[in-house]
Amino acid sequence: MSEASYRVSVPDLTFYQQTVACQSACPVRTDGRAYVTAISRGDYERAYLIARETNPFASTCGWVCGAPCEAACRRGKIDAPIAIRALKRFVNDRYGVYLGESGEPHQAPAWPAYVGATNAFDLGNTTFPTSRSGLVAARQRSPTSTALSAGKTGKRASPERSRRVAIVGAGPAGLSCAHDLALLGYDVTIFESAPVAGGMLRLGVPEYRLPRELINLEIQSILALGPALKLSQALGRDFTLADLRRDFDAVFLGIGTYQSRNLNIEGEQLDGVLRAVDFLVNVNLGGYNLDLGKRVLVIGGGNVAMDVARTAARLDLKSPDGGHPAQSGGDLEVALDVARAARRLGATQEVRCLVVEDRSEMLADPFEIIEAEEEGISIHNHVAPKRIVGANGRATGLETLNVARAFDERGRFNPQLTPDTEQIWECDSVIVSIGQTGAFDWVHPEDGIEITPRGTLAVNKETLMTTAPGVFAGGDIAFGPRLIINAVADGQHAARGIHSFLQNVQPRLVRKGFFTPVPKREFSNVGPLRDYLRWPRRQPPALPVERRVGVAKVEMGFDEATAREQGGRCLICSLNPIFDGDLCILCNGCVDVCPTDCLKLVAVSALEGDEQVAAVIKQQSAASAMLLDPTRCIRCGLCAARCPTEAVKMEAFRFTEEVVFD
């Protein structure tokens, strides 16, 4: 019987960066591993600075981030991912823009993003000055070393203050771009079509998920850097792209996608049929003249659909005597109170969400689905809308067909409808939530802007410049609806592109990796905490269902003890067992002691790989090789502790990424 073969690779810098999976999955490369570990050790200010270093919307993301870091977290391969997003909120509620240590909202100081005097920390994977004093210094010191964007710095020629940049859209993409350009010293003006800034943070995210005061403070912290904000100024209505190109040196378009997609079925024009984005914008701007009635149908299965359904369900608010709605007495925000929500939006009693996909295929986060059902939302899968029925010009019901399957053999969305399964769902309102697209009535042929078949602006992936020189775009208008953190990353990316364009320099990413050996006697101080594998994931405590009315927030946040326990679940993937073949005596002790069988001693002749692997094998005279499966390693350090010759050492990995302009 022939010997088994093993497909292997030689680890390089990219390999070790990707091993820290949470950071690799984050669009702005926030080092989740680092701030989670800092929380577990009670170093909360350091944790906040790490969370903030790459993200000007760190406090916001602590509440509503889609958390791609958690989806990538390797602890999820064992039992459940680290509660990274909730832990970010824990430290941001103490040191971010929203709450001070007293738990009371604080007034915005001159630098509202940073509470209290701090010293600069060695934050690991960064070269960005994240302390308050560091940020001030970044704006004042020599322009040859000014920070370019959160977490990434670079040398540059000095941009004159007269170089002006226009940003259209005060959402997370536009504001993040303004943040980085302001740190570079550019004169930035932000134009926003709505009467308030924040984009979909304010207009699309329900207040029970994201407090309006937090949004205000986060935006103030960016405007404090110098950008000017002009509200109620719409592209195509109050000014044209040609106007901006004439008056500014560069333009960034971050206008979002506020136009909902159509169902293209009969009855869609009836009164009582609303679009998800229109509904959420109406609610978040006051909800005037909107009566949903008692029975609401929501068509869709993504996170937007969950927000729509849960917001609609919160409108059934009556006082004990059946008269005017009463205050809930719970933890309500000030922008919308219970009475106004009920009076303006009606008394909804039943909300049903109709979804084409199977429950396991729904785009909504599972936890969002569970929370929606806890609040009384009925979710019905495998049904597709056929037509909207009505009487006297108003929708009274929705006719559907059953869906045998939503996706074909190739995994494409291609619903297979079951004939003769028509069903009428009676309702007073229908809210359609099947996606959004951009509106391009502001585009003129002379602008030179190309629109893709997907309904987005065509951009250069390296610089985010559109087909019009000096005009850049990012966020949903360039890539379609995505997570908030993706929009933040686009804003940072565009700032680099704008800087490169205006200074006529080319950006170059310089990466460096560093390994620091951890002595055996010190490993317990830097490695995973004792009993870390025994602690289950916990969700933050939630407000009781009966009190989830109006704008009362649901998630209450971790207390200190729970936060430290949850942070202690981290595997600390920046620690790696490093092998020295010259010291190895082939005793197999490390393999024997490994609790997850992630080590294996094999014959070199059994290895297969690319040219790099072949070159390494050719250079070595050894007959054996030690293989490591990094996906199974739990960083327990037992292999290094067992090795009698110290051929195995646990080493801490860190890296820097620096954008240099040539």
Image (tube, rainbow, N blue to C red):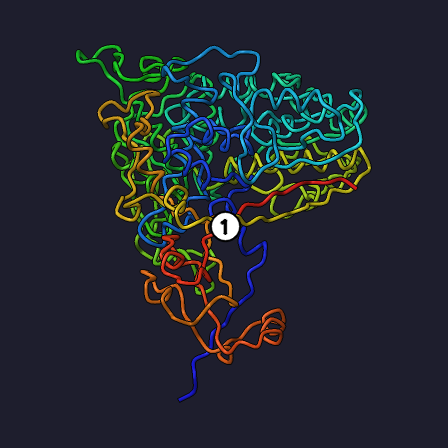
Quadrant showing the N terminus: bottom left
Q: Answer whether residue 393 is visible to the viewer in this image.
A: no
Residue type pointed to by label 1: Pro
Q: Is residue 578 left or right of residue 134?
A: left
Residue 77 image offset from top left, x and y in percent: 36, 54
Residue 314 found in image quarter? top left
Query: Looking at the image, which residue is at 67% across and 30% down?
Result: 147
Q: Is residue 518 above or below residue 205?
A: below
Q: Position of residue 470 (x, y in %)?
A: 77, 34
Left/right placement of residue 125 relative to residue 352 reads right
Q: Quadrant of the C terminus?
A: top right
Callout 1 crowding tier (Cα within 10 Å): few <14, some 14–19, many ≥20: some
Q: Residue at label 1?
A: 517
Residue 643: x and y, percent? 39, 62
Q: Is residue 244 visible?
A: yes
- Judged left or right of residue 543, residue 513 is right
